[in-house]
Image: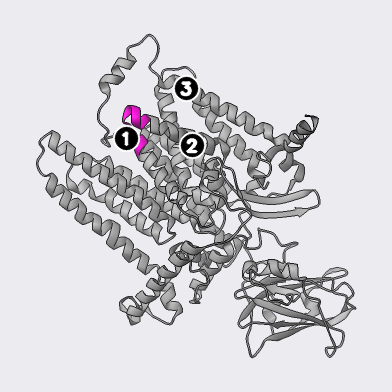
Amino acid sequence: MLNALQAVRDYLEPAMVFPAITLLLLALFFIYYAKVSRPEAGTLEWVEREISKTQLTFALPRYKMGKKDALPLAVILALFAFLAFFVLGDTEAPQSFHQFTKEESEIIIELDSPEKIESIMYYTGLWTGRYTLDLSTNGVNWIRQDPLGYEDAVKESPTPSPLPSPAMNQSYAHLFKWRLAELNADNPAVKYIRLKASNYPMELGEIAIYGENGRIPATRLWCPEAPALLDEQELVPSRPEYMNSMYFDEIYHGRTALEHLRNIRPYETTHPPLGKEIIAVSISAFGMTPFGWRFPGALFGVIMLAILYIFIKNMFGKTAVATCGTLLLGFDFMRFVQTRIATIDTYGVFFILLSYYFMYRYITTAADAPFRKHIPPLALSGLFFGIGCASKWIVIYSGVGLAALYIIRLVMAAKQFDRYSIPGFRKLLVKTLSWSVLFFVIIPVAIYCLSYIPYGLAQGMEIGEGMLTNKDFYKIIWDNQKSMLSYHGKLIAEHPYSSWWYQWIVDGRPILYYNQYEGTVRSTFSAFGNPVIWWGGFVAMVVMVLRLVRQRDGKALFILIGYLSQLLPWVFISRIVFVYHYFPSTLFLVLAIAHLFNTILESKHSWRKASVYAYTAASGVVFGMFYPALTGVWTPQWYFKYLLRWIPGAWPI
């Protein structure tokens, strides 16, 4: 018995008190919601509810933005714009690169006097390979630097050669990063450094050489063969970190964005191109820098909040609900972290939100309204659906939900026309279906194909020379679709941070993007959800089911369809998946909680405003607690252990 108690005590972490408190507060909130959502005692409210029950309908009021929405929306955008761009990434990085070719595969750096070299830091560019690193006292006899051990070589490459890698490696996982070369411990003072590339082409951006007295200034170095390696010494950082280097899937998407700009065949072809082209636009404006490749995601993440505010205001009409609901998404860890990394998920989620917003405006347009009022929201929903599909295939799942809402709305319209003997439904149906083919098929397909223009340019085609009518261009597109489908359908791999859909619901398995230790402090960030929002949001989604069944709530049906269309496909997918695939679903978790907020604020209970504001504030407090684990801010390790390790063994914090 004592051993069992000891085992339990050893397992429990001090931080586990916080999830217990969070669950208790969430339970109190939902108990309060259950109370205020029941008819008030001593009144005939229950009779009014029974009388007012009608058939399920999307004939819902749409509320306009008002003057009083300007201030809260402006404050929200200012707050989260600051948080998004603060320590996002360095605005400067080496921009000139030396390219190693077959004809010029090696370079020699000469020092003005012999120096004992203690370390070499280098900034990698495009293309992968290895550099042989040799040192010499006289330029004739060379000392080969020992290669990395085989275990390190395995880490450097998923398919390592039987031999260990050289002292300087440039694998696909380490492009546009500052790296440290491995040097022998017993090197003498040397005057020459020789680098030889194993593959061609390979690009290297900058080299910093450190002796016994620190970094050797460029004025003491001579390298006429590769001046680009020594021309931006002022950009050499004190240490490699996320602020000055790529991390996680940026190595695919940020790199491919640059390749699009340079008309190089893209390395990453497992997703459609548009998301990477958005990143490319930013790189062309800000340079190939961490800030440059992360800027558009952060910007889209902020604009996402403005769209959600308008969406919630349209649905519920209350400034307080729109403000608190938008703050919830702002304080969600997933949105914050995912939009600050140069991956393409942000763009898919952004366009999913827009397509659902305009679909909501379409289905809530009166069925017997002039057809010209049906066109704009339907067209915009299809347009953003198409743009989203060209960014990432997760948007295709949203298409199932959009189609379901579209069909339900047409069925409801048919019943309405029949019930009230309104003529003209057949004409309306034909016109709607005809325009929908244009909006949801032809235009999205056109956008999707146009997004592949960089692929054609990289293979020597030109728009002015008939690329868009060239069958070879469409063969490139078709071949890529087959390749993507094969890749995603047959992807069998293991990853320490992979997870399954049921783990996402309970926020059970974050993915660690970045982690560095230095003594007793740590810099790290992970992608997962704010427990106040994810745990509470799932319960709110269950409430949506109850509202749909008991009250025939059209808004609840809309939210449920959006949520399930993004989650259910992952139930049947057997390939390796990660928690960031739940990102689109978080939009609907927030809408579900906003629905609860609206119900509470419509009640007459005295604590209604306090409960809504307290829930929102709790999400902000938890966000503040976890801020170091979301941004890479150097923080004492005890902080993570005693405050943030809510689920030991599952949360890699």
Quadrant of the drawing holding the N terminus: top right
Question: Comparing marks 3 and 2, which lies closer to the viewer?
Answer: 2
Amino acid identity at mark 1: Gly
Depth check, front residue: 7 or 318: 7
Q: Which residue is mark 1?
A: 554
Q: Position of residue 103 (x, y in %)?
A: 64, 91
Q: Dot 3 surroundings within 10 Å: few (below 14), some, or many (20 or more)?
A: some
- Vertical side of 546 occupied by 628: above or below: below
Residue 551 painted magenta: yes
Mark 3 / mark 2, whichever is N-terminal? 2
Amino acid identity at mark 2: Phe
**Which numbered dot is residue 538?**
2
Can residue 632 be seen here? The reply is no
Q: Which residue is mark 3?
A: 608
Name the residue at 33% across, 27% down: 551
Question: Comparing marks 1 and 3, which lies closer to the viewer?
Answer: 1
- The magenta region covers 547-557
Name the residue at 26% across, 35% down: 57
Q: Secondary structure at mark 1?
A: helix
Residue 1 painted magenta: no
Amino acid identity at mark 3: Arg
